[in-house]
Amino acid sequence: MEESNQQIINETDAEIDQRRIQKLVTYIIESERFTSDTILNIVFTDNAYIHELNKRFLDRDRPTDVLSFNLHTEYLPSELQILGDVYISVEKALEQAEDLKVQLQDELERLVAHGILHLIGYEHNDPEQQEKMEALTEKYLAFSQRGK
């Protein structure tokens, strides 16, 4: 795989098509008008680790499917475009994939898109925001599904 500022880290034994994830990440970044040198990490982990992060940083004592940590700050040099880190529980994604009757890869891609959109600033605190975020997620997943 070519060198990129968007790192995909799989800390699990799950087989993940990282090329599809990388294409999706690149497409989202370009579509949202970020440069290709934007720094972003996607970390696939387990329930135990994401539970620890959720408790430590959000005071939620449970595992979740995806957490986004925006690392952009005014203290960084302006030439650095850092979005942040997206952590995804592969265990939680597998449960959700089974419930939705979709492939694990497809659910992981949905969570990647969702997590990146949070880093960019999209939220789903009210119905209008939820609708916008869901529409964008579906747009990006449609792109990803074409590459199957």
Image (tube, rainbow, N blue to C red):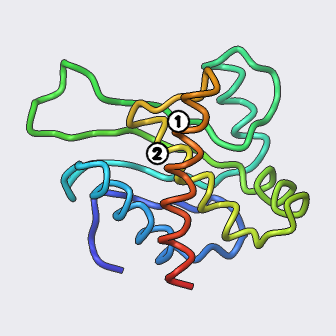
- Which of the two labelled residues, at mark 2 and mark 1, occupies the earlier sequence position? 1
Residue furthest to the right = 99
Q: Residue 31 at what x, y percent from top left?
A: 31, 56
Residue furthest to the bottom = 148
Disc ID at residue 116: 2
Q: Amino acid at mark 1?
A: Ser
Dot 2 crowding, Cα within 10 Å, few <14, some 14–19, many 20+:
many
Q: Quadrant of the C terminus?
A: bottom right
Answer above or below: position of 49 versus 102: above
Using residue 134 as the reference point, say whether residue 24 is left or right of it: left
Q: Residue 139 at what x, y percent from top left?
A: 50, 59
Dot 1 crowding, Cα within 10 Å, few <14, some 14–19, many 20+:
many
Q: Residue at x 71, y 30 (%)?
A: 52
Q: Which residue is mark 1?
A: 68
Q: Amino acid at mark 2?
A: Ile
Q: Quadrant of the N terminus?
A: bottom left
Q: Secondary structure at mark 2?
A: helix
- CA–CA distance in space, label 2 to label 1: 7 Å
Disc ID at residue 107: none
Q: Residue at x 71, y 40 (%)?
A: 49
Using residue 70 as the reference point, say whether residue 100 is left or right of it: right
Q: Residue at x 85, y 60 (%)?
A: 100
Q: Residue at x 52, y 39 (%)?
A: 132
Q: Residue 102 at what x, y percent from top left?
A: 79, 69
Q: Nearer the viewer, mark 2 or mark 1?
A: 2
Q: Residue 117 at what x, y percent from top left?
A: 46, 42
